[in-house]
Amino acid sequence: MKRTISISLAVLAAVCLFRAAQLLNTAHAQNDRGPVIHGVNPESLPDNGPETNRGNRPGVGDALTTGGTGVVTPPITYHGGPLISTPTIYLIWYGNWNQANGSDTPAGQQIVRDFAGSIGGSPYFLLNTTYNAGGTIITGAVNFGGEATDTGSAGTRLRDSSILNIVNNAISSGKLPYDASGVYFVLTSSNVSEQSGFCTRYCGWHTANNGSVGHLRYSFVGNANRCLSACAAQTTSPNGNAGVDGMISVIAHELEEATTDPDLNAWYDSGGAENADKCAWTFGHAQYQVANGSWANMKLGLRDYLIQRNLEHNTSGDLCKVNSVQN
């Protein structure tokens, strides 16, 4: 889904169909163990109708969509699969991250590194400790294990299978270690497309597969600068890079799902939605404006970020929150 000055009828039709198919697509991904997608921003739809748990919609000068404060249904349940106690983030910079576009830049990469180094132990990520099950305790900590660069080994038109190959190559070449607790993020520059639906169906996804180096948990997230209205909540952002700031929220989404449902057989609801899916594109009531007028809802390390809420699991009812005391 994307809002552009000019949009083809074909793309418009695909966008309109997305809303009705969103839960079906997610459930299908769960059942056939394909990638579980994080859909594009519903606010970019041309037919903004009522949606579950969306809360207020922003007007001019208002905070971004806060989301509802009530119990989120259907409840999320545990299906017996493994969890990751303490995930380790690995970043693979794919494509051209040295462009003169103000987004695919070394400064943009540093925003992501700072997030990866500060998300662990944060009040936000500690929400995932409510998913302890099967003898595994989720600590709420996150390690940052390192990064690698791939300037384009698979070209600029990727398939889902390309992402697994990129991760395999990074490990088999010795650029990154194999880590059974690792979540490997392939982060593509904005000149790279993912042909199964980046910018039209999703902004990112995660999955698991057996690669040549071992069992892998990995994720695709593209630079939202390719389609800001579809994959970013605002065009002016806390760190002055709307594309990369948009990526941060998607990375957080995929990281918490990869922690609580790494092999797509642990925590999800009757419709196939994982914890972050159930709070997607809602940012809570703790939003504040930074100096450039953009909105943020949390400070991690020295940076402000706008990151979607996550689902706090409770036996009395699941709630979308930014941290344990703020929704």
Image (tube, rainbow, N blue to C red):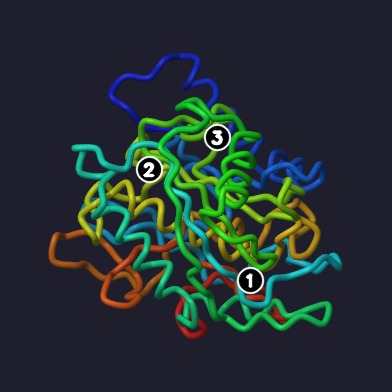
Identity, as a three-letter code, of the amino acid under mark 2: Ala
Q: Which residue is mark 1?
A: 71
Q: Which residue is mark 3?
A: 201
Q: Could you tell whether 36 is left or right of 299 in the image?
A: right
Label 2, secondary structure: give it. Answer: helix
Identity, as a three-letter code, of the amino acid under mark 1: Val
Residue 39 horizontal/vertical position (percent): 55, 44
Q: Earlier in the sequence, mark 1 or mark 3?
A: 1
Q: Earlier in the sequence, mark 1 or mark 2?
A: 1
Could you tell me how far apart the alpha carbons at marks 1 and 3 are, in whole angstroms?
27 Å
Using the image as rendered, state which of residue 29 and residue 285 is in the foreground. 29
Label 3, secondary structure: give it. Answer: loop
Residue 54 horizontal/vertical position (percent): 50, 56
Using the image as rendered, state which of residue 68 and residue 90 is in the foreground. 90
Quarter assignment of residue 265: bottom right
Instruction: Give residue 224's mark.
Output: 2
Residue 38 in sight here: no
